[in-house]
Image (cartoon, grey):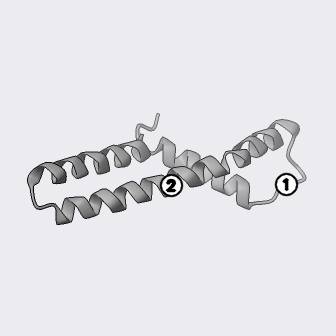
Amino acid sequence: MKLFGEQIRFVSRVIEARLSFADAGWDRDQLRDRISFARLYPRVVVSIVVSLLIIGIFGAVLVYSPDGKAGKLGAVLIGIVIGYWLR
């Protein structure tokens, strides 16, 4: 049982299903799984874009914060995003 990286593995399966062609030797279940993963592609792209925006914005807050409170909030939110991707 793998504890970390399930979200990353899921995203890689979705991207791989979206970008590759179907194999003629697959049975119906394999093809159905591939299609269901490929349909999740927009959700995965939005998750990646939102995560990068959060890391970028709050990373800038963390670096350029004049007081410690905003920097702590930025560090917490970056940690939440990293935790989301490592779950």
Amino acid beneath label 1? Asp
Q: Residue at x 72, y 49 (%)?
A: 38
> Viewer-proximal residue, 37 or 74?
74
Q: In the rendered structure, which disc, 2 or 1, sits on the residue that comes first in sequence?
A: 1
Task: Estimate the x, y position of residue 29 in percent, counting from the top left.
Answer: 82, 36
State the count of labels: 2
> Viewer-proximal residue, 78 or 8?
78
Q: Is residue 67 above or below residue 10?
A: below
Q: Residue at x 18, y 66 (%)?
A: 64
Image quadrant holding the C terminus, namely top left
Amino acid beneath label 2? Ile
Q: Secondary structure at mark 1?
A: loop
Q: CA distance from mark 2 to mark 1?
A: 28 Å
Discs 2, 1 touching: Cβ within 8 Å: no
Residue sitting at the far front:
66
> Viewer-proximal residue, 19 or 23?
19
> Viewer-proximal residue, 70 or 40?
70
Residue identified by numbered label 1: 23
Residue identified by numbered label 2: 48
Q: Is residue 42 left or right of residue 69?
A: right
